[in-house]
Image: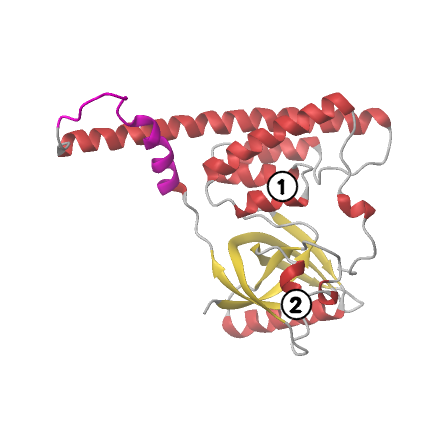
Amino acid sequence: MGQVIPLFPLGTPLFPGVVLPLRVFEPRYRRLMRDLLVQRAEERIPGFFGVVAIRQGWEVEQVAPAEALYDIGCTARLQSVRPLSDGGFHIVTVGGDRFRLLDVLVSDDPPYLRAEVEWLADEEAAEEAAGDADGLVGLPGEVPLGPPDEAAAAGLDELVSSVARGSMDVLVHNVGDLFARYVAAVGALRGGDGEDVESMGATDEESAALMEAVGDDPRALSYLVASAALLTPEDRQALLAESATRRRLATESRLLRRELTLLESIGAVPAPLQRFAGPRSVN
């Protein structure tokens, strides 16, 4: 049995560490906010809910929720809640922990969706060691001289760790440079055609400030790029589902190169698919 948490389906996934402001005015989610505020007052713990991206349609309850939602999501931890005069709320949340949906629960009370979830852990150290040790095996035709002694094993471990740190640094530098070029290209196109196209959710100055803030944190950089770049929901969801920072950054390197090629060859900023969708939930 997993933990049961409230769900808030959205058109795009939330990533750990990313700030998500929301205006809540649909009745079922007003109820969710009231329930979380009561919980926070009684149990003295910050409230949170799970954000999951919608795979198909906009009104999740019109189809089977388990089919309409992606199975990997991220918790949104409440940072501030401001009640509005119309009974709604303006809230600011930040992405917390990743989870996998085990079951989606639909009921009349509470009226919002809930889910049984399992929490997903990152694979950082294990993935790095496994990935880099593959390149350090003996050459073809080499004859092993016997089992390594403790000193040799320690030396190999240190070599693996050194290679892992070095290759991660290369990835971080590469993705950082590509993202800076990407932001500049999108900004140039936005300013050059005079059209009211979708922004990336942050000004160039804000993106530069964020890049500086996450400069030495590969995990934070990977989630910043995943949330800020104008990627498809499928691409973003795949990045959220990836449990290892190294593989996430490697994927982002490929995606950013693809997007830069499209920007430079077509000369247009991609519009989110939501712009062409049909009616959607008021939240």
Residue carrying label 1? 235
Q: Seen in the image, is 81 located left or right of residue 197?
A: left
Q: CA distance from mark 2 to mark 1?
A: 30 Å
The residue lying furthest to the bottom in this view is: 109
Which x, y percent locates residue 34? 66, 71
Task: Classify the position of the N terminus by image quarter.
Answer: bottom left
Measured along the vertical axis of the image, is residue 217 above or below residue 91? above
Taking the spot 65% from the left edge, 51% from the top edge, the residue there is: 20
Task: Classify the position of the C terminus by image quarter.
Answer: bottom right
Measured along the vertical axis of the image, is residue 225 above or below residue 141? below
Three-letter amino acid code at disc 2? Met
Q: Which one is nearer the viewer's eye here, 94 or 173?
A: 173
Question: Which type of secondary structure does the marked residue at label 1 adopt?
Answer: helix
Question: Which type of secondary structure does the marked residue at label 2 adopt?
Answer: helix
Residue 130 seen in the current view: yes
Please tell me whether residue 266 belongs to the stretch shown in magenta. Answer: no
Question: Which residues are drawn in magenta?
Answer: 125-145
Q: Which mark is residue 177?
A: none
Residue 217 seen in the current view: no
Q: Which one is nearer the viewer's eye here, 146 or 94?
A: 146
Residue carrying label 2? 33
User: First in sequence: mark 2 or mark 1?
Assistant: 2
The residue lying furthest to the front in this view is: 141
Three-letter amino acid code at disc 1? Asp
Q: Seen in the image, is 155 located left or right of residue 230?
A: left
Which x, y percent locates residue 33? 66, 67
Mark 1: few/some/many CA within 10 Å (<14, 14-19, 20+): some
Mark 2: few/some/many CA within 10 Å (<14, 14-19, 20+): many
The residue mark sitting in front, 2 or 1, is 1
Q: Tell me which corner region of the image, top left, top right, bottom left or bottom right, holds residue 273.
A: top right
Taking the spot 39% from the left edge, 26% from the top edge, the residue there is: 166
